[in-house]
Structure formats: C-alpha cells, structure tokens
C-alpha cells in the first residue's frame, strides 16, 4: 500500500477519504499497490470520526514521514497551502489538489519545483469538479492547436441563475441553497463576483497556451447585477444568460480572456447546461468542437477527480506526468477595451421606444431591438453589432449624455 495524506477535512477532503476507503479494492486493482490514508491534517477536532488515529494538527508529521509518497491538498486558499505544497514537493512527495486559487496564482512555480524534484503536481479537480478536463487538454487533445476554450466553470452561479430563471427564486435564497449543498466557496463572493471562474479559465489558458495567465490579467465580472428583467430579454432574444469563462487566441497572437455574464443563443451547446453542472467547449483545429459536461462542484464529484490524480501519482511514483507551463506576463493578454464583441443594452428614458432606438442607432450604428411583451413602458433593449469595447463605451457615454439611462449591458457570446 502506498501511504498518503489528506490536508483539509472539509467538504472535499472528507469526500476524498470516503472515496479512497469505499473504493479500496478497485483502487488497488487499478494501481497495483492501493492507497492508504495515513494522516488527515486539519486544525479542527473530529471527535466522532471512526478513525481518530489518522488525524493530526501538525503538518510536520506528514512532511517528515518518508513513508508518505502522495498528498492531497484540499485545504483551499493560497496560505498555508502554498508553503505546504512547496515543502512537500521539495521533499520528494507528489501533491494533488483541487485548490484552483493556488494553481492559478502559483502553478508555474509549483510545476517547476515538481519537475526539479522528479515528482508530480496534479490538479484535475481544480477545474470542472468531477469533469475530466485537465488531462484531456494536456493529453488527448494535445495534437490540436486549441483555438478557443469557453465554458460554464462555476457551479454555484449556474445553480443560482438556473433557480432565478426557472423558479423565480431570489438571488439570496438560491445562494443559501448552493452553500448548504456544499457548492459555494468559503467566501461566496468568489463565486458570485466571478473570481472562481476567473481562476479556472486562467488555469485552462495557461495549460493550453503554455504561459502562466494570472487571474489578474482576466477581465472578471460576476452575476450580481443580473436582473429578472435581463433574463426575460435574453429569453425574448432566443437564449439564456450564463456566466462564461472564455479564452481565445487572436490573430496577433494575444489572448482574449474574460469571465462575464453572456447572452448564449438557444442553439449553443452551453445553453442547456443548468443547475450545478458545468460545460466546457474546446475548439481544436483538428477535432472541431469538443464539449465536456458534468457536475462542476460538490463533495463526491470533486473527490473523484482528486483520488484519480492520487492514483495516477501512485502509478507514476518514479516517473513524471508531463504537465507544465512557464511563467507569463500581462503582455500575453489583449487589453479588454481593445477586444470586440456584440452587446445587449437595456435602457430607460422619458421618450418613446422608437425615439430611444433612433438615438441608440445614432450612437452605436445599426442596432437590433428586442421585442418583449409586458416590458416596462419607459424601457427598451437592443443588440449592437460587433464593436471594439472602447468604441462601445464612447457610444454608451454619448447615449447617456442625451438623457437615456443605461440599465444593463451584457456581452453576446459567439458560441
Ligand atoms: N465554488 C465552486 C463552484 C466549487 O461553485 O463551482 C467548485 O470549484
């Protein structure tokens, strides 16, 4: 049996221990060796646990035990996870993680340290929960030039949007339900403000394009400003609103990378991805579109990916899995206001709808109105053609100068 440790006994950590114990026979069959959890690190007490002897509050117990070859870091957050991971890799132990914040901020460095010490640092669970996406991108699709990756990467916000759309549930109630089900981050602002999805698209972009794309480089906007009125206009337009993480390589070689709510056409494969499910669309030059779909959050889906990485480490104790990217800088990313897309605007004014649309055309060029039965009399909505963001902003400022208030602006996806 290969001895292992689990750092963090929260939702995911307890799931990891459960999966290892309940699947011990099949894990043994598939890895030849089997995995035994020797330590569980957590600062909290678990007096009712059936295996109290495994718990420790001391990281050094794990670090200094030469029998421990594989460690699952499922603590979350950058500190102390970063320090612990670095020390473990330097001491020749492989580490697997679901910690997207750590991978997104320190991935290039930790992968380099792993390489220097001939061990593995694997993070399948960091993106898409139980959906296989890191391995497919780094192995199965490796022969492609990846043109674009776009997806619904946050289960909590997708759950909230689905509840708002389908059940007219308030944002707060839907968030509370997502927290209760173990989907949300410790600080759910990371979900609803888009930072969690930003970390995930930054990991996917780094993996695909080979340079670390730090979350700070990703234009990030959450779902807190989405209203039921916008949801109704999206439906009248022929689609839904989803929080999308997207990266694509532009003709000048720079990356257009963003996380923001988008109008998704009902024809898109991503439009039917609801509840806690995630969907990730990869456009390869050889494969065309490939879509990955499954539960993007939750105890057992995420634990499944963590344990699969532990098994991979056990099978490759003396070998490295090829997985790396080099450090990157802000230059790899196109500034957001230089990118271009079509957008939906919802506006309000003290003039007729026809007059508002006429003024919108004077500012934005040709626009397409969205007809919504039962719309408020002082409001209307329209879609622009594809425009550079800086030009959209100038046009929007001009419209507002003429006394029309902009209530919402949402990107229209080209997916
Ligand atoms: N809070 C995250 C989500 C958990 O809702 O997707 C999985 O990364």
Image (cartoon, rainbow, N blue to C red):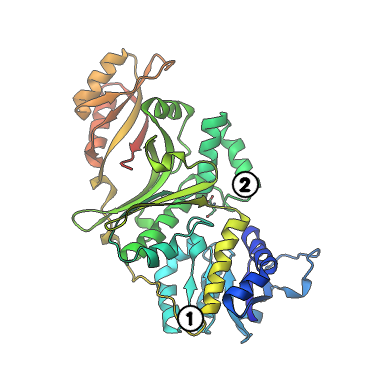
For the view shown, which residue lies furthest in the bottom direction? 66
Q: Is residue 10 above or below residue 1?
A: above
Instruction: Say which quarter of the image contains residue 240.
Output: top left
Looking at the rendered image, the quarter that the N terminus falls into is bottom right
- x and y percentages locating residue 242 in the rendered image: 43, 40
Classify mark 2: helix, strand or loop: helix
- x and y percentages locating residue 333 in the rendered image: 28, 57
Q: Is mark 2 within 8 Å of ligand 1?
A: no
- x and y percentages locating residue 2 in the rendered image: 62, 81
Q: Is residue 50 above or below residue 286?
A: below
Q: Is residue 267 above or below residue 254?
A: above
- Residue 338 in sight here: yes
Instruction: Say which quarter of the image contains residue 118.
Output: bottom left
Q: Which mark is residue 119?
A: 1
Please tell me which residue is depicted at 62% across the width and 47% down the height of the picture.
179
Q: Identify the residue position indicated by label 2 in the image.
A: 179
Label count reads 2
- x and y percentages locating residue 390 in the rendered image: 23, 41
Q: Is residue 405 left or right of residue 159?
A: left
Q: Is residue 14 left or right of residue 277?
A: right
- Between 256 and 37, the residue placed more toward the observer is 37
**Residue density around tag 1, few if under 14, some if 14–19, many if 20 or more, within 10 Å:** many
Q: Give the mark nearer the N terminus: 2 vs 1.
A: 1
Disc number lying in front (2 or 1): 1
Q: Is residue 228 above or below residue 80?
A: above
Instruction: Say which quarter of the image contains residue 385.
Output: top left
**Residue density around tag 2, few if under 14, some if 14–19, many if 20 or more, within 10 Å:** some
| Mark 2 → mark 1, Cα distance in angstroms | 35 Å
- Between 164 and 338, the residue placed more toward the observer is 164
Please tell me which residue is depicted at 28% across the width and 58% down the height of the picture.
286
Looking at the rendered image, the quarter that the C terminus falls into is top left
Classify mark 1: helix, strand or loop: loop
């Amino acid at each position: 049996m290969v001895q292992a440790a689990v750092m963090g006994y929260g939702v995911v950590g307890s799931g990891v221990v459960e999966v290892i114990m309940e699947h011990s026979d099949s894990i043994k069959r598939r890895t030849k060796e089997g995995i035994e959890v020797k330590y569980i690190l957590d600062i909290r007490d678990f007096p009712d646990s059936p295996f109290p002897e495994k718990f420790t509050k001391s990281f050094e117990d794990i670090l200094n035990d030469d029998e421990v070859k594989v460690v699952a870091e499922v603590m979350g957050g950058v500190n102390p996870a970063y320090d612990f991971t670095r020390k473990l890799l330097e001491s020749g132990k492989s580490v697997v993680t679901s910690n997207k914040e750590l991978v997104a901020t320190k991935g290039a460095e930790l992968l380099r340290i792993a390489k220097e010490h001939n061990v593995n640092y694997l993070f399948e669970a960091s993106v898409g929960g139980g959906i296989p996406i890191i391995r497919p991108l780094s192995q199965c699709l490796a022969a492609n030039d990846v043109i674009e990756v776009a997806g619904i990467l946050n289960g909590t916000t997708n759950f909230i949007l689905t509840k708002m759309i389908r059940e007219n549930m308030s944002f707060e109630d839907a968030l509370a339900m997502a927290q209760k089900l173990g989907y949300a981050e410790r600080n759910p602002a990371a979900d609803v403000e888009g930072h969690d999805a930003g970390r995930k698209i930054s990991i996917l972009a780094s993996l695909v394009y080979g340079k670390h794309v730090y979350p700070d480089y990703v234009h990030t906007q959450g779902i807190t400003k989405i209203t039921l009125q916008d949801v109704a206009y999206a439906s009248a337009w022929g689609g839904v609103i989803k929080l999308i993480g997207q990266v694509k390589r532009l003709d000048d070689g720079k990356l257009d990378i963003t996380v923001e709510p988008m109008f998704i056409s009902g024809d898109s494969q991503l439009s039917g991805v609801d509840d806690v499910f995630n969907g990730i669309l990869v456009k390869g030059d050889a494969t065309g579109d490939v879509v990955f779909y499954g539960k993007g959050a939750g105890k057992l889906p995420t634990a499944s990916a963590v344990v699969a990485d532990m098994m991979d480490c056990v099978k490759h104790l003396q070998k490295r899995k090829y997985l790396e990217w080099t450090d990157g800088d802000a230059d790899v990313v196109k500034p957001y206001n230089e990118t271009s897309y079509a957008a939906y605007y919802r506006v309000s004014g003290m003039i007729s709808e026809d007059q508002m649309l006429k003024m919108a055309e004077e500012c934005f060029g040709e626009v397409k109105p969205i007809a919504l039965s039962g719309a408020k009399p002082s409001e209307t909505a329209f879609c622009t053609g594809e425009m550079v963001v800086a030009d959209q902003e100038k046009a929007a400022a001009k419209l507002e100068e003429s006394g029309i208030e902009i209530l919402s602006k949402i990107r229209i996806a080209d997916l």
